[in-house]
């Protein structure tokens, strides 16, 4: 299948996406080898595993799945020489609405990911690894199977890889279509053949009690690809890309009301929100104004245009000092977005213009989370559907004045009280939408008819 | 070996707990009960209900990596900003817990509200009402009103999950206790959740039923009205039930029970926790084995044979008739068929009767079946051990039965006294039985033996009397009276005492069951020094007592 050719934007720094959409680039191993593929694996196999772990620590690489946890620290939790086998899992369950980066790696550059995985396995001494790919990527799963077979034929996988004495095998496991399988402990349960109910932490931290109760590393596709480049460049060199504590590049997926949505690989923090929207994505649609941005996948808290955000700002002399910035001036890095009250999350930037009804937008998100809540723990199970029902009713013109506060109250009762981060994922949109666009919610509720909600719903309390 | 003690602060007070104590248990021990739904001490902790959220902290570490100490010399606690579940973590040195802080209260209110929004709230017609943890915790920790204005989720109702359990999925709060019980304890992983989110519901594996012999334990541990006993539901409001601590008499395990009764009718039996015997569980067969107590055809009146057949009579007359007919025979012409279902007190009196009669023709009727790996014993008699200790049977119960049967057939034995046993179960045909010149039957239900009896003396069922039994593992346990025996039926030990007197022997000085036990305690070395009250609700291991004295 020929890829639609699209040249990178000049402001991009393509490392992981170097070959995505490249002219003449194909996803077979020959093409990958012609580009110097698996050279980093050869290099890594000549290094000590602990050296690789250390390089990754030095690189400052943070997880690209959503939480942004330092990858080297995560690997450091695996104690070398333990009695149990170590497993590595590549989380390819890319499901966060607004995120579509990993699928391009899987579809167009699977060997980059496999090389990153084998290196990572070598670093943490995992002999067995799994790629957990979401069920909605059937093509991706086929491509990975073929790529794994090719890697096996070439001796990059299997017994005694490249004569190093290191054995490593990778299997593809397809999910069955549940968002929660992207939560690492839910993923592990699913991989074990059970319902993807996330595990309680403590005690079930994957690094100690992961897959089959063995030490397990779970990394995102993009994170594992970065490992290959860290081996190539060295951790210190990699750390020069981006900003301190926000190193490397990020694959940003821009969707919504911009002229040119798409995916872009940008140095972390090198570009502001405004530059992303107006320079890189061609600005808003004609006659439209920016209203809001969800910066890191649908679970990230929404940011309102026109608001100012308190954070450390780079001064003309290069030092950092407290300051206030507009939405458009927020640098796209982990720490700045966190300071702005949201998160870099999975890199899914959802842009909304002034034509958007925020109650509708929240209802859309609520619907997703109500559908995807696994149902294991009470607050998320009951709260996610409740919030959806409220916004649903508001949109039907049956809102009541207390809906806005009830929405916030319900979300507050979910966040921080659940087994896994899904609680936050479903509560943060409601908390932030209601906080930032309170007037809009109150107005929608007010516009509801004067009949009691029970009458309008035909429901019972 | 005593476990290491850890210092833990609960609601401002420092306590010490052995290492390995669950936080939720530590709180309970400190008198700070933490509400819970999914947590059960005998099952794994999934942490899913979120009802037991508490505020938790760990010692604040100083720059020297040692805990900072406050003015009271105790560690300064650094509180975790997020609430933590208390059901899945063990206490740690210097841990701080707040079970009643504003954050904790808020969490509980939130969880209660969530649990109730899709709950039917039809308590007036729900059979769990009165013993529903949803009701109880709602009153204790919840809000009076609800903010929920939406339609509730619809789910399957009145599902026959198995032959003995009925499920209402709308009432289910998805705590998963039943699933874990079936998987972890009953070893039959038949229950599970299907569908997702708020639409999740409990069901059995496709093509399977919840038909385990332990299925009713899921009803006990269900904190709400989702799982109900098909046998018990809608029979009686639980607050009307009188609860009597007793033991199950369906096999030699002797599971500890609570008998729920009202106005002399037993409505249900539920297990009572005893880690030395049955943990928190009992089998369905034993649990439901009480309906015969309420049977229409219970023996209610003493009967004596007239020329026209059996006729009702008074106790004095029946006892006198029994005494007269027995006195006509020599000791070796009389056999006593006792039962390993009798209490120790009854067996003791039976032994005294045997001695008074001077017969050596006596035994009990064994009952055996297949044992399971959990609670059901191969010995289906509850007190074989007691019968052996008291000497009403030997090391092989029932070993003498065939000889006795032979002597009845040959006419060597002319009179038989039976205690709760039917001679047809002891290898005798109706024509053999009809050869007997005298047949005194003490029983609670009619059978082949009572039909042929010369005197029928109505006794009491297990829930109608006090007494003690020794289970298969040598544990002495107590039965207690929950209901009165029907009609003129009497306590069996008293009947036997009066029989002894009726044959002209001494049995004075035995007015109370305590007196009977006192005699046993003096005569049976294993029970020396014990009394009925000393047995207590949890029983006494005679094996351990032996080891102690040895």
Image: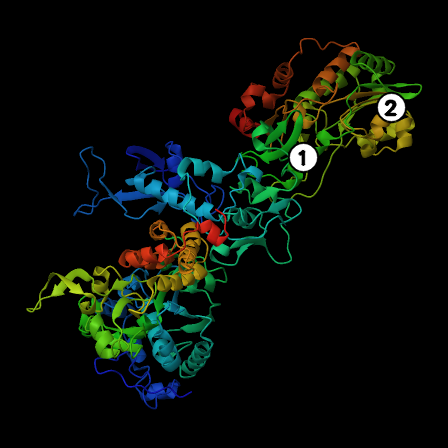
- Which is more toward the observer, A390 or B453? A390
Left or right: where B243 falls relative to B328: left
Q: Which residue is mark 2?
A: B413
Left or right: where A215 falls relative to A195: left
**Mark 2 closeness class: few <14, some 14–19, many ≥20 residues within 10 Å:** many
Residue A59 at least partly seen: yes
- Which is more toward the observer, A48 or B287? B287
Residue A211 at least partly seen: no
Q: Which mark is drawn over residue B250?
A: 1
Quarter of image, res A30 = bottom left
| Closer to the eye: label 1 or 2 | 1
Left or right: where B69 falls relative to B442: left
- Which is more toward the observer, B489 or B442? B489
Dot 1: element: loop
Q: Position of residue B496 (x, y in %)?
A: 74, 17
Dot 2: element: loop
């Amino acid at each position: 299948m020929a890829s639609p050719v699209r040249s990178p934007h000049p402001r991009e720094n393509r490392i992981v996406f170097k070959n995505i959409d490249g002219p003449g680039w194909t996803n077979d191993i020959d093409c990958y080898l012609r580009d110097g593929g698996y050279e980093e694996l050869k290099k890594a196999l000549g290094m000590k595993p602990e050296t690789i772990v250390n390089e990754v620590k030095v690189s400052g690489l943070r997880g690209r799945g959503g939480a942004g946890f330092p990858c080297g620290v995560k690997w450091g939790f695996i104690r070398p020489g333990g009695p149990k086998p170590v497993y590595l899992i590549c989380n390819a369950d890319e499901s966060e609405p607004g995120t579509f980066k990993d699928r391009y790696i899987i579809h167009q550059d699977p060997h980059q990911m496999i090389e990153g995985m084998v290196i990572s396995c070598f670093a943490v001494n995992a002999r067995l690894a799994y790629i957990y790919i979401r069920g909605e990527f059937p093509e991706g799963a086929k491509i990975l199977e073929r790529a794994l077979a090719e890697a096996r034929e070439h001796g990059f996988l299997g017994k005694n890889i490249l004569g190093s004495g290191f054995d490593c095998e990778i299997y593809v496991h397809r999910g069955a279509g549940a968002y929660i399988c992207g939560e690492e402990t839910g993923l592990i349960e699913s991989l074990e053949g059970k319902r993807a109910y996330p595990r309680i932490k403590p005690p079930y931290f994957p690094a100690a009690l992961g897959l089959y109760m063995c030490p397990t590393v779970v990394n995102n596709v993009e994170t594992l690809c970065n490992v290959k480049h860290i081996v190539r460049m060295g951790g210190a060199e990699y750390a020069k890309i981006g900003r301190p504590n926000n190193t490397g590049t990020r694959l940003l997926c821009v969707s919504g009301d911009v002229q040119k949505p798409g995916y872009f690989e940008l140095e972390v923090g090198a570009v502001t929100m405004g530059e992303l929207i107006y320079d890189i994505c061609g600005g808003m649609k004609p006659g439209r104004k920016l209203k809001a941005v969800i910066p890191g996948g649908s679970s990230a808290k929404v940011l309102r245009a026109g608001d100012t955000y308190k954070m450390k700002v780079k001064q003309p002399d290069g030092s950092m000092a407290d300051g206030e910035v507009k939405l458009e001036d927020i640098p796209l890095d982990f720490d700045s977005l966190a300071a702005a009250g949201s998160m870099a999350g999975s890199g899914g930037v959802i842009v909304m213009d002034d034509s958007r009804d925020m109650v509708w937008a929240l209802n859309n998100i609520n619907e997703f989370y109500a559908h995807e809540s696994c149902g294991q723990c009470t607050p998320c199970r009951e709260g996610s559907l409740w919030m959806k029902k409220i916004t649903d009713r508001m949109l039907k013109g049956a809102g009541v004045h207390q809906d806005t506060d009830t929405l916030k109250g319900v979300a507050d009762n979910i966040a921080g009280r659940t087994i896994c981060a899904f609680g936050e994922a479903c509560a943060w949109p409601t908390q932030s939408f209601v906080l930032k666009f309170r007037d809009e919610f109150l107005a929608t509720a007010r516009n509801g008819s004067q009949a009691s909600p029970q009458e309008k719903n035909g429901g019972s309390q | 070996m005593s476990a290491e003690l850890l210092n833990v602060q609960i609601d401002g007070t420092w306590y010490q707990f052995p290492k390995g104590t669950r936080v939720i248990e530590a709180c309970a021990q400190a008198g700070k009960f933490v509400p819970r739904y999914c947590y059960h001490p005998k099952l794994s902790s999934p942490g899913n209900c979120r009802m037991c959220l508490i505020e938790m902290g760990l010692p604040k570490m100083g720059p020297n990596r040692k805990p900072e100490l406050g003015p009271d010399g105790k560690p300064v606690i650094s509180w975790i900003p997020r609430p933590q579940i208390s059901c899945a973590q063990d206490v740690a040195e210097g841990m701080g817990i707040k079970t009643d802080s504003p954050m904790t209260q808020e969490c509980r209110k939130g969880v209660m509200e969530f649990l109730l929004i899709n709950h039917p709230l039809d308590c007036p017609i729900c059979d769990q009402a009165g013993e529903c943890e949803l009701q109880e915790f709602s009153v204790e920790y919840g809000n009076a009103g609800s903010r929920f204005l939406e339609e509730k989720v619809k789910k399957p109702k009145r599902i026959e999950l198995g032959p003995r359990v009925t499920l209402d999925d709308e009432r289910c709060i998805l705590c998963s206790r039943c699933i874990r019980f079936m998987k972890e304890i009953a070893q039959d992983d038949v229950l599970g959740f299907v569908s997702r989110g708020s639409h999740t519901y409990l069901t059995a594996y496709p093509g399977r039923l919840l038909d385990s012999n332990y299925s009713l334990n899921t009803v006990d541990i269900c904190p709400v009205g989702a799982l109900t006993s098909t046998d018990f539901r809608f029979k009686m409001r639980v607050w009307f039930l009188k609860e009597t601590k007793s033991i199950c008499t369906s096999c030699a395990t002797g599971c500890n029970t609570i008998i729920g009764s009202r106005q002399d009718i037993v409505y249900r039996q539920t297990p009572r926790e005893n880690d030395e015997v049955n943990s928190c569980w009992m089998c369905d067969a034993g649990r439901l084995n009480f309906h015969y107590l309420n049977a229409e055809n219970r023996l209610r009146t003493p009967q004596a044979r007239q020329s026209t057949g059996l006729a009702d009579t008074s106790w004095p007359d029946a006892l006198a008739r029994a005494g007269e007919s027995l006195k006509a025979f020599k000791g070796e012409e009389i056999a006593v068929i006792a039962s390993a279902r009798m209490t120790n007190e009854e067996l003791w009196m039976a032994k005294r009767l045997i001695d008074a009669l001077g017969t050596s023709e006596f035994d009990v009727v064994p009952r055996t079946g297949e044992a399971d790996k959990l609670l059901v014993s191969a010995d289906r008699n509850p007190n074989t051990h007691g019968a052996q200790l008291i000497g009403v049977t030997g090391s092989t119960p029932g070993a003498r039965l065939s000889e006795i049967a032979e002597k009845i057939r040959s006419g060597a034995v002319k009179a038989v006294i039976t205690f709760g046993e039917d001679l047809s179960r002891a290898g005798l045909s109706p024509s053999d039985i009809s050869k007997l010149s005298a047949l005194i039957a003490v029983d609670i239900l009619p059978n082949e033996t009572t039909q042929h009896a010369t005197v029928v003396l109505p006794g009491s069922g297990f829930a109608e009397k006090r007494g003690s039994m020794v289970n298969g593992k040598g544990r002495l346990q107590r039965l207690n009276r929950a209901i009165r025996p029907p009609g003129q039926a009497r306590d069996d030990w008293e009947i036997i005492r009066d029989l002894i007197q009726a044959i002209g022997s001494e049995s004075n000085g035995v007015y109370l069951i305590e007196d009977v036990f006192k005699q046993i305690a003096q005569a049976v070395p294993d029970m020396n020094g014990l009394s009925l009250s000393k047995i207590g609700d949890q029983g006494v291991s005679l094996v351990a007592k032996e080891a102690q004295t040895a």
